[in-house]
């Protein structure tokens, strides 16, 4: 049995499988990056809260909890920013849970931040529930519910969650799809640029084609999940083709469909780049190569810009202030991310495969990456100002805190990139190749085994299968040694590989944080929504309406029950008064007469009678009752159930305090 020569089996600075041992600095750097990756991925998958609502409900008409005397003709909602509406965006349910809205919801006066739906005529008294679910213009679903009453509050059978969001499984898959789409875009764009300007190779081709497949698959998944994601349906909603048609009529759906069409053009581009263009480059004829270079550069730029625009036209850049400027800036930002991080992945793949790469090619990528970083900083500063808006929002909102995490990761990435640039400057051309006497010896032995039968002019003896397997293992060992020596042939090459791997690890986490940011309400929008809600709260009295339950007993068995007295808004000035009578089974019951008066003993004011109007069974009301001042008022309630049976109950009410 012939063994491999010492030149192959012996390794300097031996490490696992012939790799040079890592120095303490490199080990520490990789361990820090690994810990960072693990911690952030845990935070993203477990600790992160669901995406905040991107459009906040700031006003409703009728107001939440309001009691109106007559049925309104429509229900109107106002949001902090524009929303997209569907057929079931606003549903109004009567006390029995039956829908009473008519027609589809529409914007009021052409304002995209409003939604209104008409109501049937002749609605009965009682409590009505309004359930709404809209999609922010930056593609994120928002949902909620509120109630109002006609005539008087009542029990309701409508069961609507107040903050219904996407199904958990659908939301998880949708977030995975968004992350995969970002990664696929970076690998596709960065791989193409690296292949065209630095070096094209089989590993780079695999990375780029893998990016195309990932982006196409993720986009198709997002398109199928879009309906269930916005409607709150389960995973079974993917099979609803009618819902898919509704999705395609929205801005996010159109963006996803456009992305799929552009990926078809990108497939043709990849076939030319790694086919005709690569063959002409291998022929060594610069003229033939330049024939395609201009067309590839122009076509690739158009396709890349189009792909990046599918994010800009449907997410944060498309809403808010200066959207006309923000969208092209976002496109440039996306392209810079793709060129930098995707090219980084292509460099890792090239170095890992042991492919020979010239120092000039690595330096070209280094300059390209530096330009991308400068572009990222400039566009990122503008986008951060636009989305955050204030220093307080930078630390006081989820978006601002995640943005700080992203900035920190970019800083770590730049620090490692500086180390990579240092090793790039020391990189030597023509790394040691492993095509030495070991390869020649193994090949020679293989030829001797295959040709031994012809040397003696006799019939060839069958090859020894054990010997054949041994030679195959030796060839595999030589090939592996060749790859390792190409990768670690000199100190600069090995150190560059390790630093670039560390960059790639941080880049993976950075893309995850960017995905979370794309699903989090921008700080400026969150602050604006809070201010709008605060303004409404300030304009509304902070004192809750008074509701008092008073048992009464006029004597006979039929004269036992309870009265509910309501005073709204329970402040000095004009007030609305309701009195409801119920028997012991909580059924509305009438009485011969109901009288109410209010007295303020400390001011010797009163009694002030309340003129009540009988509206329906067990319901009396006064549309306007003036209270001159606040204080502790004494309520007197008289219920007469027959000519001789009546009772008067008193309660103290703190009004305006």
Image: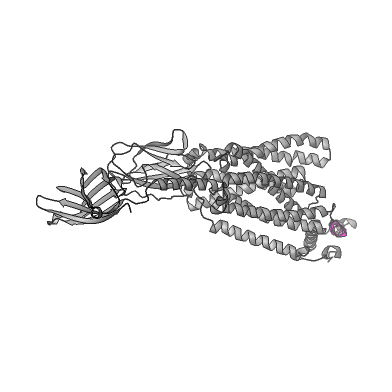
Q: Residue at x 61, y 55 (%)?
A: 405
Dominant secondary structure (helix, strand or loop) of the stretch shown in magenta: helix
Quadrant of the rendered structure where residue 261 is?
Answer: top right
Q: Can you give x and y, in whole percent of width and height, for residue 573 in the image?
A: 30, 45
Residue beneath the point at 74% across and 58% down: 498
Q: Residue furthest toward the right?
A: 456
Instruction: Where is residue 309? Give x, y as percent.
Output: 61, 39
Q: Residue visible at 73% across and 34% down? A: 295
Query: 624 or 24: nearer the eye?
Result: 624
In magenta segment, residue 647:
no
Pick the quarter of the image with the N terminus.
Answer: bottom right
Q: Nearer the viewer, residue 225 or 120?
A: 120
Q: Which quarter of the figure has residue 194?
A: top right
Counting the numbered discs, the total is 0
With 399 as the anchor, is 429 left or right in this view? right
Question: Which of the pair 153/132 is nearer the observer?
Answer: 153
Up-down relation of residue 26 to residue 51 (above or below):
below
Q: Is residue 462 visible?
A: no
Asked whether the viewer can see residue 347, the reply is yes
The C terminus sits in image quarter: bottom left
Please indicate whether residue 436 sits to the left or right of residue 220 in the image: right
At which x and y percent is residue 491? 81, 59
Highlighted magenta segment, given as a residue range: 434-447
């Amino acid at each position: 049995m012939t063994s491999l020569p010492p030149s192959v089996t012996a390794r300097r600075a031996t490490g696992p499988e012939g790799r040079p041992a890592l120095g303490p600095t490199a080990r520490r750097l990789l361990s820090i990056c690994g810990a960072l990756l693990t911690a952030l991925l845990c935070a993203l998958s477990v600790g992160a809260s669901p995406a905040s609502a991107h459009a906040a409900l700031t006003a409703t008409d009728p107001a939440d909890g309001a009691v109106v005397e007559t049925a309104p003709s429509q229900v109107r909602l106002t949001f902090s920013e524009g929303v997209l509406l569907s057929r079931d965006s606003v549903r109004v349910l009567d006390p029995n849970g039956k829908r009473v809205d008519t027609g589809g919801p529409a914007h009021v006066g052409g304002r995209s931040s409003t939604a209104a739906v008409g109501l049937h005529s002749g609605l009965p008294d009682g409590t009505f529930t309004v359930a709404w679910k809209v999609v922010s213009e930056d593609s994120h679903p928002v949902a909620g519910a509120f109630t109002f009453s006609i005539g008087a509050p009542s029990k309701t059978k409508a069961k609507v969650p107040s903050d219904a969001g996407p199904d958990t499984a659908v939301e998880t898959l949708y977030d995975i799809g968004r992350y995969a789409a970002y990664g696929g875009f970076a690998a596709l764009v960065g791989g193409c640029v690296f292949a065209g300007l630095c070096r094209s190779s089989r590993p780079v081709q695999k990375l780029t084609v893998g990016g195309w497949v990932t982006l196409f698959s993720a986009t198709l998944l997002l398109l199928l999940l879009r309906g269930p994601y916005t409607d709150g349906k389960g995973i079974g909603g993917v099979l609803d083709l009618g819902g898919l048609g509704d999705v395609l009529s929205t801005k996010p759906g159109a963006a996803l469909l456009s992305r799929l069409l552009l990926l078809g053009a990108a497939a043709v581009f990849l076939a030319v780049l790694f086919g005709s263009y690569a063959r002409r480059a291998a022929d060594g004829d610069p003229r033939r190569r330049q024939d395609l270079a201009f067309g590839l550069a122009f076509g690739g730029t158009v396709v890349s810009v189009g792909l990046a625009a599918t994010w800009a036209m449907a997410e944060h850049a498309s809403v808010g202030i200066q959207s006309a400027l923000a969208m092209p800036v976002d496109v440039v930002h996306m392209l810079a991310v793709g060129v930098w991080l995707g090219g980084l992945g292509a460099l890792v793949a090239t170095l890992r495969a042991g492919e020979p790469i010239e120092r000039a090619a690595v330096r070209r990528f280094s300059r390209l990456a530096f330009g991308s970083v400068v572009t990222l900083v400039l566009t990122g500063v503008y986008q951060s100002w636009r989305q955050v808006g204030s220093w307080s929002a930078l630390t006081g909102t989820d978006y601002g805190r995640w943005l700080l995490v992203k900035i920190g990761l970019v800083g770590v990435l730049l620090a490692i990139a500086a180390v990579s640039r240092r090793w790039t400057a020391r990189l030597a051309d023509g790394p040691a190749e492993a095509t030495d006497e070991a390869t020649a010896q193994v090949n020679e032995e293989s030829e001797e085994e295959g040709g031994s039968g012809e040397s003696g002019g006799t019939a060839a003896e069958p090859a020894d299968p054990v010997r054949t397997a041994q030679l195959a293992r030796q060839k595999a060992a030589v090939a592996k040694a060749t790859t390792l020596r190409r990768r670690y042939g000199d100190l600069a090459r090995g150190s560059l590989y390790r630093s670039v791997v560390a960059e790639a690890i941080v880049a993976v986490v950075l893309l995850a944080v960017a995905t979370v940011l794309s699903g989090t309400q921008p700080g400026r929008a969150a602050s604006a929504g809070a201010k709008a809600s605060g303004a409404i709260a300030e304009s509304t009295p902070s004192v809750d309406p008074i509701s008092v339950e008073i048992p009464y007993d006029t004597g006979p068995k039929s004269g036992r029950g309870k009265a509910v007295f309501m005073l709204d808004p329970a402040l000095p000035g004009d007030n609305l008064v309701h009195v409801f009578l119920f028997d012991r089974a909580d059924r509305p019951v009438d009485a011969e007469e109901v009288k109410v008066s209010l007295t303020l003993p400390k001011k010797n004011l009163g009694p002030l009678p309340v003129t009540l109007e009988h509206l329906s069974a067990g319901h009396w009301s006064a549309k306007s009752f003036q209270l001159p001042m606040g204080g502790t008022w004494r309520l007197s309630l008289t219920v007469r159930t027959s000519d001789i049976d009546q009772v008067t109950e008193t309660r103290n009410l703190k009004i305006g305090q």
